[in-house]
Amino acid sequence: MDMLYNILIDPFVQMVDAPDFLIQVVWEGFVAGVLYALIALGFVLIYKASGVFNFAQGIMVVFAGLSLVGLHEKGVPAWLALILAIGIMAILAVCIEKFVMRPLVGQPDIILLMATIGMTYFLIGLGEVIFGGEPKQMITSELGLPTGSTAFEMGERGLVILQHIDIAAAVIALLMVGGLAVFFNRTRIGRALRAVADDHTAALSVGISLNQIWAIVWFAAGIVALATGIMWGARSDVSFALEIVALKALPVLILGGFTSIPGAIIGGLIIGIGEKIGEIYWGSLVGGGIESWLAYVIALIFLLFRPQGLFGEKIIERI
Amino acid sequence: MRMRTLLAGSVLVGLAASFAAPALAEDSVYIQLPTYRTGPYAGSGIHIANGMSDYLAMINERDGGVNGVKIAFDECETGYDTQKGVECYEQAKAKNTLVFNPWSTGITLQVIPKSSVDKIPVLSMAYGLSAAADGNTFPWVFNPPDTYWDGLSAIIKYIGDQEGGMEGLKGKKIGYIFLDAGYGREPIPLLDNLAQKYGFEVLQYPVPGKEMQNQSSQWLSIRRDRPDYVVMWGWGAMNPTAVKEAVKNRFDMSKFIGVWWAGGDEDARAGGAGAKGYKSVSFNNVGADYPALQDIKKLVVDAGKSHTPANTVGENLYNRGVVNAVYMVEAIRIAQEMTGKKVINAEDMRVGLENLKIDEARLEAIGLKGMIAPIEITCANHSGHHSLFIQEWDGEKWTPATDWFSPMTEEVTPILMQASKDYATSNAPWPTREDACPAN
Amino acid sequence: MFYREAGQYKTSYAADQQIFPIRQDRIGIAVILVIALLLPLAASEFMLSAIAIPFLVLALATIGLNILTGYAGQLSLGTGAFMGVGAYSCYKLVTIFPEVNVIVHILLSGTFAAAAGVVFGLPSLRIKGLYLAVTTLAAQFFLEWCFIRIPWLYNYNSSGAIEVPGREVFGTLITGPAASGTARYYVVLAIVVVMTLLIKNLIRGRVGRQWMMIRDMDIAAELMGVRPLIAKLSAFAVSSYVCGVAGAMFVFFYLGASEPAVFSITLSFQVLFMAIIGGLGSLVGSFFGAAFIWILPILLRVGLPALGVDVAAETVFQVAQMVIGALIIFFLIVEPHGLARLWAIGKEKLRVWPFPYA
């Protein structure tokens, strides 16, 4: 009975007892979810356009963040470093398209997946050779991003603390999704991208250059990676340990579907909030630390019921 | 299948070339330094590696080695990865290293059983297996100046002092946030013992290795549970993230105390102005004003013979790397005296480590007086339970917050002996010590 | 000219169905086996302990993954965790029944891994491809968490690591720190060779062909009477069994002690790389892949400084990583079917040599 009470009742009692804390937990989950969503967004962009499951998105986040901070450390002013970092992501996109994607066109999924894991190894080595292995502080204030926090008093001892940088992260994520939506629906290149996503051959036949489109998609994913790198870097720091966090994007994708941008956002939020609530209210029952696998189990359960994801376009192949 | 032979053949040739070759100059000894300048723990590892190799380089430059015997050393990158660590160990063994410094609890645990067979002393300075302090069971393993259990007991003692004596701990809540691996789990038995004895409550907050940079759940729980103090056992990227989260959640930093490995300058700096007051237990002072460090600056760093950025000389983890190198150099010196040989081997090195004694006069001569406390290792006690102190981050640098004080040796020794006995039984047949320690 | 089967007549079905129908292949295998048996005479301790033993063990793990991914077509990212299950159950068995031969324990420990594999293989009945990869990732992280959180698994010792006790077989110490590299090498070699042979026969037989049918076209396979439930779960079971045995050997004959971090996702990727670089669906490829991924970095790390290229240790490490990443991409581009395919092409060429075709 005690056990059942602890699982079924006690967590909810706790939630009601301390609503301010619940709000804080949900907010923290929301922010983590936004960051997961940003990483997932990078995956979705590339998957949509080229059917490549880009495992290297995580290291691209680190690489972009490192370029920005590394350049600033070498004495480049922050705004210029930002522009140069964008430039580096553009060069990276072109290189990836030219040296990896183009020769591998038409190969099975798993080969492309392996190629992006190969890219991950390469970029980790390259990043460490150029910038060194030590973690770096994100240049938050130099970039004009807000620091500090606002606290709301609630009740007697209640306190909800909102970090300004987290609010900025949410706003930037929103702007990015909006921008991408406009880009996909209203611009010529965006429509070409969608055409490629629907049917490579048909797109080729109406004169869309696949190579160019792929380079653009990888560049867009690179910019998303840079934004993610800045935001996550501001929360902890920029280091190669971040790369592993990117794996969290996988359950997000399962939830949101591989091809849906809104799905990536919603999926990210569900995973982010779900795992925080799970860890804090239920985690202590088994000793804590369940956050490392909870997201995957949520995704696993979800898969059994709705394999195409919340907003996935087509039903995946099932047996 | 034929490819395999071919590969094996080429490996044979390559290795023969690489291992037969290091024809060391007549008067030199070889030490391999396993380091990690890459990977998630590089943030802590780089400074340690710099400190170790700079000091050894300085000894070679300034004194021409130890009593004229140069120290040939090179680094082996482990990336904090156990597989690579074992590979480095095998390499070190093949090149006859004097001593092996694993610099990772995981790698230490791997090499402890091998060390007694291969007759290579393992120097795990204030990390690794706490039970290894028992020299009777672990003649080849050394963990001076203190074990994790000493460190934890010192922190609890300090908290007791803050609360006006150990009885002040009664009814207090102490949070324990730790890296969820062998390293972070090791202090828990002692923590539970002490909690029972002094009547405080322990709340555990494990941080999974993969989630090091994503600790908001742990810190939210800390906010909910409102522990009176938080003790941290972190390493690498976990530390700066924890300090940042603590600042964010407005935890009283003066009640946040880390183990010595959570005391990097960059770890605290990550918290910005809010990190002021963060504490960590330590066994070495910071600063570059000590004559030995000045020599390093002059002869090695400024001479362009190292990759160390000049401003990191004197930082906490750098100095700790230096301490590790000092232990090695002093052990070589003592081994030379005791054996009468100039070029010693690994077995002599063990003797040197076992009789390692650095008193005030010797510290003065080394040029580190005041940076570390005098230490002495005995045959039976390979750690020593030496004095520690608490340091505090003032927003710019670490400053001592207390005097040197000794850990609760009487609490640590019994569980240490028990643990070492358990280790020997569960790994039976555990080799017994060949030359028994004199019974005091 | 030298490598062709002309003139080798088969007069019985048994002769026609043997594993190596060409005489030259049999000679080649015999030569390799003899070299493998004589290796300890020529090799240094470092070569045996740090290269040969882990190479053989990882080759076996690669074979395990290859059964699942290469033959049955189910992508898995949880190899590391299944190896961990093998290692931990072997440790438990050895400490609970110390008097039983340790080799028996190692072979038994695979069954626990097989059970874990079947449980986490259940979702494969509904999903496949990358989606299945995510469920195996869940297995990876969940099991890794268990290795840390269930102290019973490491006998409640304070370090949280498992240490391999010394055990003797026929009077020779084969595990533990005091066991010589040669003894450990021979045990590993024997287990790997025997298991490879068994698996080769399993794959040639009914079960293996069912797996391949499921891989190539599951619906057609089902129509022809292959039961997907049995076929898929048996693939998961056999694959995890082999991985579990490999994991137990990894700890007992190579590492000597291990903490949960050893069986992390990195190990899963490492083995997956070996399978893909070597060639999916090829046993000989598993050996090539393991050699490539395990030995090349060591050669780079040991070799570069030995060649007189004086660079810092971490730079060698980083450059080695870059080279491996680049080589993986290069191989995928040049030969997506892996080294095994290159080997097959080479053999074809050799058959007709010195003529362009025959």
Image: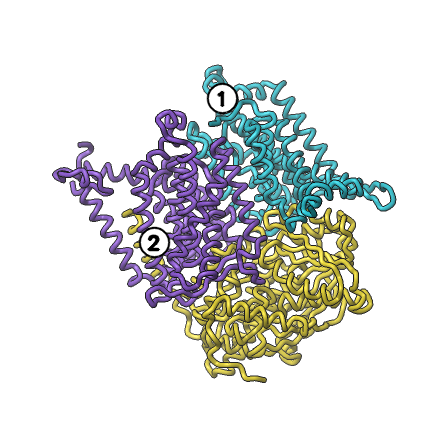
Chain colours: A cyan, B yellow, C purple
Closer to the camera: disc 2 or disc 1?
Answer: 2
Q: What's the amino acid at mark 2?
A: Ile
**What SS does tag 2 mark?**
helix
Up-down: is A198 above or below B121?
above
Q: On the picture, is C225 further left or further right than A129?
A: left
Q: Observer-nearest residue: A45 or B425?
A: B425
Label 1 residue SS: loop
Does mark 1 fall on the same chain as mark 2?
A: no
Residue at the limit of the structure toward the right, as seen here? A156
Q: Position of residue B224 (x, y in %)?
A: 76, 48
Residue C191 is tagged as: 2
Q: Position of residue B322 (x, y in %)?
A: 60, 67
Q: Is residue A80 among what the camera can see?
A: no
| Mark 1 surroundings within 10 Å by alpha-carbon count, few (fewer than 14), some (14 through 19), many (20 or more) | some
Classify the position of the C terminus of chain B by image quarter: bottom right
Number of marks drawn: 2
- Percent across and percent down for residue B379 are 55, 79
Q: Which residue is mark 1?
A: A209
Tell which of B66 and C133 is nearer to you: C133
